[in-house]
Image (cartoon, rainbow, N blue to C red):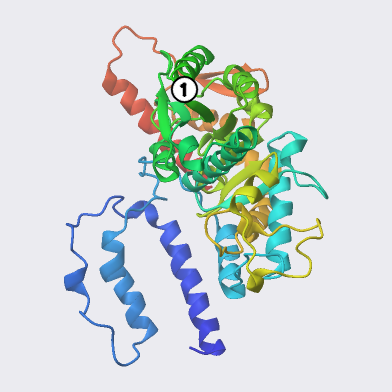
Amino acid sequence: MDAKEFRQRGKEMVDYVADYIEGIEGRQVYPDVEPGYLRPLIPNTAPQEPETFEAIIKDVERIIMPGVTHWHSPYFFAYFPTASSYPAMLADMLCGAIGCIGFSWAASPACTELETVMMDWLGKMLQLPEAFLAGKAGGGGGVIQGSASEATLVALLAARTKAVRHLQATSPGLTQAMIMEKLVAYASDQAHSSVERAGLIGGVKLKAIPSDGKFVMRASALQEALERDKAEGLIPFFVVATLGTTSCCSFDNLLEVGPICHQESLWLHIDAAYAGSAFICPEFRPLLNGVEFADSFNFNPHKWLLVNFDCSAMWVKKRTDLTGAFKMDPTYLQHSHQDSGLITDYRHWQLPLGRRFRSLKMWFVFRLYGVKGLQAYIRKGSNKLNEALLEKINSARKIHLVPCHLRDQFVLRFAICSRTVESDHVRFAWEHIQGLATELLRA
């Protein structure tokens, strides 16, 4: 394929993708296939001669689409949301075209510097404490990881290294193996399974703190576990607090847990993978109060902030905590600016060496939506939109609602009024509201 054909096929692919997104509601959300369905549909070996682009696209519909679970279908309610937007898709195209492997500043200066700035932009949207921002010469900063699972593991490994070195400095006779067998990490019993997996990979004990009646990790339960383990000669070193648990979106009590971690010199990592996007809205920002006690904080713009996978935002207060754990500088990766103090070599902030130009997706999305546009997306509608929906509902005269104002929010009230109301009536009303809302959003 030369540049001329690429221009043609590229335009065709954009049309195909746009048609797919616009028509996704008409596709069956969950595939009706059995394991192994695909192998009989394709040859056992790669073709010896080139095939046509038309044949490939035809086979996408014949072979691939029947086995696709359509995550962006309006009927997909499983797992968690995964963000998608046309600006992010366009940025991914450009990322693929540039094709840099941004393991160091020298490998592609724009790749490194745009990421640093975009993470500061996003940190400011969240009103993170200044310590988490890179600025021009800050001690903290942000990095784009592949997933929240990866961010948790990176934080745990950095915390483990920090704890081991501190203990060896104060007690030179201790070996790493002696310390490792006593290290203990903690998380709520509602924490994501990736936290347990991080403990497994990191080779440390991970203990689940029983949550309360609202599925929240509280200070009392954490303190009890810490005292019990210290009495047994174990060494607590790491705590994960979850803001928006997978099962029920409960929030661990940061304002209680944070001070304990500070007093006990425990690394506090905050996992806000899904809920974190909401914190760009001032009315939801109080849910992040207590972040000032954290050593690291992570959430996924690729879940709810219109940035396509993969883009997991992670901040640390002290970048040296990461570079101290992961830094290795073979001669072939060194460059003349690495000790200037003005740039970041992100290979020291993550598990892989290579990395893609993922900050382009953030740059495109943030500029084409703006903070207000992203906030409106999180809120899923404005007062004017809700007023228009109420007008459509009452004009149709199939059901009747009245509104109210909750501070500055125009809210539609749904009250069960009649003695004879049954579940079928409520279901009909809900489907009617959904239908009118969908019409309004498409207009």
Which residue is nearer to you in this view: 276 or 376?
A: 276
Which residue is nearer to you in this view: 94 or 30?
A: 94
**Up-down: is 311 above or below 188?**
below
| Residue 205 locus on image (x, y percent) | 41, 33
Let me know if residue 63 appears in the view. Answer: yes
Residue under the image location 32 percent in, 53 percent down: 69
Residue underneath mark 1: 233
Residue farthest toward the bottom in the current orientation of the protein = 49
Which residue is nearer to you in this view: 226 or 43?
A: 226
Quadrant location of residue 123? top right
**Up-down: is 223 above or below 353?**
above
| Residue 91 locus on image (x, y percent) | 60, 63
Let me know if residue 378 appears in the view. Answer: no
| Residue 210 locus on image (x, y percent) | 40, 18
Q: Is residue 316 left or right of residue 73?
A: right
Residue under the image location 51 percent in, 27 percent down: 236
| Residue 25 locus on image (x, y percent) | 37, 51
Q: Is residue 198 left or right of residue 11?
A: left
**Up-down: is 135 above or below 17?**
above
Residue under the image location 38 percent in, 37 percent down: 193
Is disc 1 placed on a helix, strand or loop? loop
Query: Would you call the spot at circle 1 few (<14 residues within 10 Å), some (14-19), or many (20 or more)?
Result: few
Q: Amino acid at mark 1?
A: Gly
Quadrant location of residue 432? top left
